[in-house]
Image (cartoon, rainbow, N blue to C red):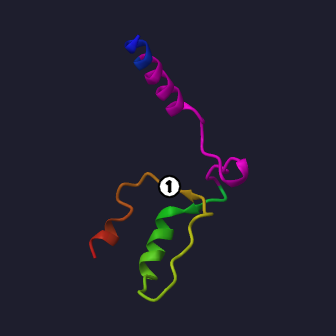
């Protein structure tokens, strides 16, 4: 009887963990995939580094879609400074 309960709990946790499928933004509509309308991530971050100030307001990135490249050396020039 106890092993049946444990099995049932394990199955319920697995089903709950796998449910949902994908992220849906506010309002129940799926977020659009990053594509031609996305912001290139690497140049955006490099611009943020050059504009860094202790008195400036933070840049809002919540509604931006970013496009990521696969270049492993994208930030080498920033990290070596």
Task: Name the one closer to the observer, 6 or 62.
Answer: 6
38 on left or right of 56? right
* Kind of element beneath mark 1: loop
Q: Is residue 58 above or below residue 29?
A: below
Q: Position of residue 79 (x, y in %)?
A: 30, 69
Q: Position of residue 45 (x, y in %)?
A: 46, 69
Q: Which residue is mark 1?
A: 68
Quarter of the image holding residue 67? bottom right
Q: Residue at x 35, y 59 (%)?
A: 73
Does the magenta segment cover residue 73?
A: no
On the rendered image, what quadrant is the C terminus found in? bottom left
Q: Residue furthest top?
A: 1
Q: Is residue 50 above or below residue 29?
A: below
Q: Residue furthest left?
A: 80
- The range drawn in magenta is 7-35
Q: Is residue 31 above or below residue 2?
A: below
Does the magenta segment cover residue 20?
A: yes
Q: Position of residue 9 (x, y in %)?
A: 45, 23
Q: Residue furthest front?
A: 1
Q: Position of residue 41 (x, y in %)?
A: 50, 62
């Amino acid at each position: 009887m106890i092993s049946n309960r444990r099995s049932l709990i394990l199955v319920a946790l697995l089903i709950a963990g796998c449910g949902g499928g994908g992220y849906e933004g506010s309002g129940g509509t799926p977020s659009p995939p990053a594509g031609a309308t996305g912001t290139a991530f690497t140049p955006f971050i490099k611009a943020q580094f050059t504009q860094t100030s202790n008195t400036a307001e933070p840049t809002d990135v919540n509604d931006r879609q970013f496009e990521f490249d696969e270049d492993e050396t994208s930030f080498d020039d920033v990290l070596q400074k």
